[in-house]
Image: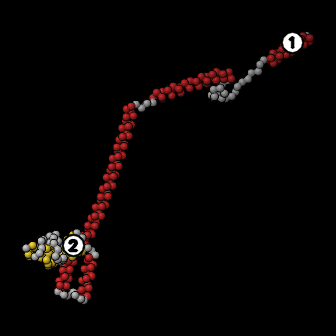
Amino acid sequence: MPHHGNEEEHNASTDHDRAGQQGDSREPVIRDNRKVDPVTGQARHPEGGHHEGAHGASSASAGQDSDGDALAQAEEILNGVEVPAEESVAQGAAATGSANAEAAELRNDLLRLQAEYVNYRKRVERDRAVAGEMAVIGVLNSLLPVLDDVDAARQHGDLTDGPFAAIATKLENALKTYGLVRIDQTGVEFDPTIHEALIQQPGEDIEVDTVSQVLRSGYKSGDRVLRAAQVIVAVPA
């Protein structure tokens, strides 16, 4: 019996060695536990190793399907883009022409407003000058009676000398600076615009009506006659 036990142990040892030799002759198994597929670039699901190959294949198929969907969407977008037709081009040209016409109209309005402003400024300056001239004429007209008294005093010999003669001379010179001109010439042709004929007398050696005597001096300022001179006119005989 002891011998039988040794034989069984020997056989078991022999079987174990054979199994070990057969196990050593098998190829090693390599498992890929990476979370990202190096081929498709897709994330792997944390499942068993025996599903990794199928998952990689399904991921690649899904990537191809997604690329196909993207191409289909791009074609739909391109098909949805409308190419401008001739009507659209015509409408754009009409809009551009309308904008140009509006700009030209605004420019004309601006030029018209500028011209109106220039005319308004000239009119204001002209009115201002006329107002100043009328003010001067008003003052001169108010002093004409004083000048008549000065002339009468001079004719009577009251202003030949003395302080009043100097004052009368200064007054007349001051009024001349404002454009006051005396109308008192004799021997000139009668002019109805500056002369008022009170008396007509036949004259000798004259061919036209001529002022022979001034009864009251007249005055003018520039081209405006303030008062006509009252005169005696000699007419041809």
Q: Secondary structure at mark 2?
A: strand
Position of the C terminus by quadrant:
bottom left
Residue drawn at x 63%, y 26% is 40
Residue under the image location 20 percent in, 77 percent down: 144
Tag on residue 11? Answer: 1
Q: Nearer the viewer, mark 2 or mark 1?
A: 2
Question: Residue 87 appears in which quarter of the rendering?
Answer: top left
The Cα atoms of the two marked residues, 2 and 1, are separated by 165 Å
- Is disc 1 surrounded by few (<14), some (14 to 19) or many (20+) residues within 10 Å? few
Taking the spot 37% from the left edge, 34% from the top edge, the residue there is 90
Tell me where residue 194 appears, x and y as whole percent. 17, 71
Between 221 and 75, the one lying in front of the other is: 221
Q: Which mark is residue 19?
A: none
Residue at x 20% of width, y 80% of height: 147
Compare residues 131 and 227 and report the one nearer the observer. Answer: 227
> With respect to residue 197, does 120 lie above or below?
above
Question: Considering only order in the chain, which callout, 1 or 2, is on the residue closer to the N terminus?
Answer: 1
The residue lying toward the viewer, choosing from 101 and 74, is 101
Residue named by callout 2: 220
Secondary structure beneath dot 1 equals: helix
Q: Residue furthest right?
A: 3
Q: Could you tell me the amino acid type at mark 1?
A: Asn
Q: Is residue 16 visible?
A: no
**Residue 211: percent from the left, percent from the top?**
14, 75
Mark 2 surroundings: few (<14), some (14-19) or many (≥20) residues within 10 A: many
